[in-house]
Amino acid sequence: MIDAAYERRSVIVTSNLHPSGFDSIMPKTLATAAVDRLLHHAHVVLTEGTSLRLAQATTGQGVQPLTPPGRP
């Protein structure tokens, strides 16, 4: 997908994994090629802070189960 979009379309990738660690989720040659294409014309935005979803989940404010129709 990255190769197909390279220099043709915009691609947004979000990850909590640094690009140098992509070889932990795919073969090293594939990771190297993907990172090379992703970063070639990239605007990299680094963020810091705590996870809002994790904070909500640990305080019981996360996803609420759906109530089936007809049940209170």
Image: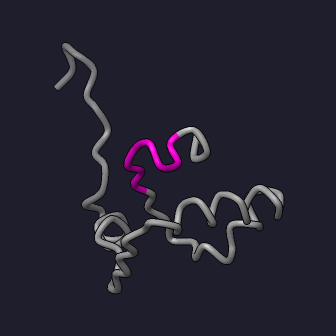
Nearest to the observer: residue 25 or residue 72: 25
Q: Residue furthest front?
A: 7
The question of residue 8 being in magenta is answered with yes
**Residue range corresponding to the magenta coloring:** 5-12
- Residue drawn where x is 67% and y is 77% of the image: 20
- For residue 70: magenta? no
Q: In this figure, what is the number of numbered marks?
A: 0
The percent position of residue 44, horizontal first and vertical second, equals: 40, 75
Give the percent coordinates (x, y) of residue 17: 57, 72
* Residue occupying the point 33% across, 65% down: 53
- Specify the quadrant that holds the N terminus: top right
Quadrant hosting residue 36: bottom right
Position of residue 61 in the picture relative to residue 50 (left or right): left
Residue found 31% across the figure and 49% down from its top: 63
Q: Quadrant of residue 67?
A: top left
| Left or right position of 20 against 15 | right
- x, y percentage for residue 33? 71, 59
Instruction: Classify residue 14 as left or right of residue 2.
Output: left
| Image quarter hosting the C terminus | top left
What's the magenta bit mostly, secondary-structure-wise? loop
In the rendered view, tell whether residue 6 sits above or below residue 71.
Answer: below
Tell me if residue 8 comes above or below residue 55 in the rendering.
above
